[in-house]
Amino acid sequence: MKVRQRAPRHIPDLGQVVSTTIAILEESGESGFRIESLMERTGISKSSLYMAFGSRDGLIAAARARQFEVMIQESIGPIRMIAEQASSRDELRNNLSLITNFVADLSRTAQRVERCAIIAGTKGRPEFSKWLAETQTRLSTEFAEIIGGAQARGFITRKHPARMIANFIQATTLGRVIVGFDLDAGPDELAQWTALANDIYDQMLFVD
């Protein structure tokens, strides 16, 4: 008797599942997020979903951590490029000023608010907090390696640890969210901020 072969079950790519989860969260928010909608869009079964992510909260944590990573990489990417391509300390110094101006632009306020919302979402959610901490630690390590490479080439002073520099730059960048809600910030606020930031970075990065 001929045995009928069962068609292999389709197992969606988990990266696609996370991307689709992000899309649904952007459409409906966490309160409106439905597992059934994700299953319909990706074809993943509930058992496969929970096997991969543990719970609904684990799935949302993975999606939010991915969003967070993309946001930070948008800042780290240009800094990596100018650090690796610079042929001298002066070139790195000049290019960093341009990057500071780009990253600090208030058009990115909405993105910073979203980052703050993701961080706030870890309150009372240890699984989510763990996912985000692992993501942030990995990104801080990557950023610190960029700074460390520039220190090894003699372009950046070793006066401060590379990781502390990386975390300080990330903190000041995220802190720009406050200025986005300052109604009395003048039209030349960005130029003033860039000048102040560059003075700080000069002392922190280039003065031995």
Image (cartoon, grey):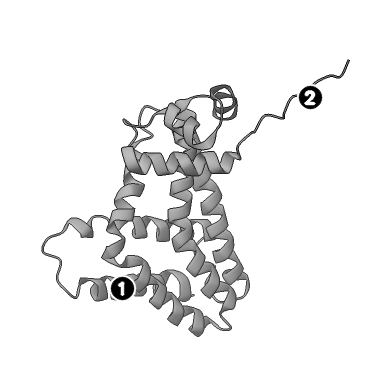
Name the disc covering residue 207, or none. Answer: none
Q: Which residue is mark 2?
A: 5
Between 1 and 175, the one lying in front of the other is 1
SS label for mark 2: loop
Find residue 64 and report its image quarter.
top left
Mark in the foreground, 2 or 1: 2
Find residue 202 and report its image quarter.
bottom left
Is 201 situated above or below 130? below
> CB atoms at circles 2 and 1 under 8 Å apart?
no
Asked whether, in this view, residue 39 is left or right of residue 117, the answer is: right
Amino acid type, label 2: Gln
The x and y percentages for residue 147 are 54, 65
- Can you name the residue that lies furthest to the left here? 184
Q: First in sequence: mark 2 or mark 1? A: 2
* Viewer can see residue 176: no
Q: Which residue is mark 1?
A: 194
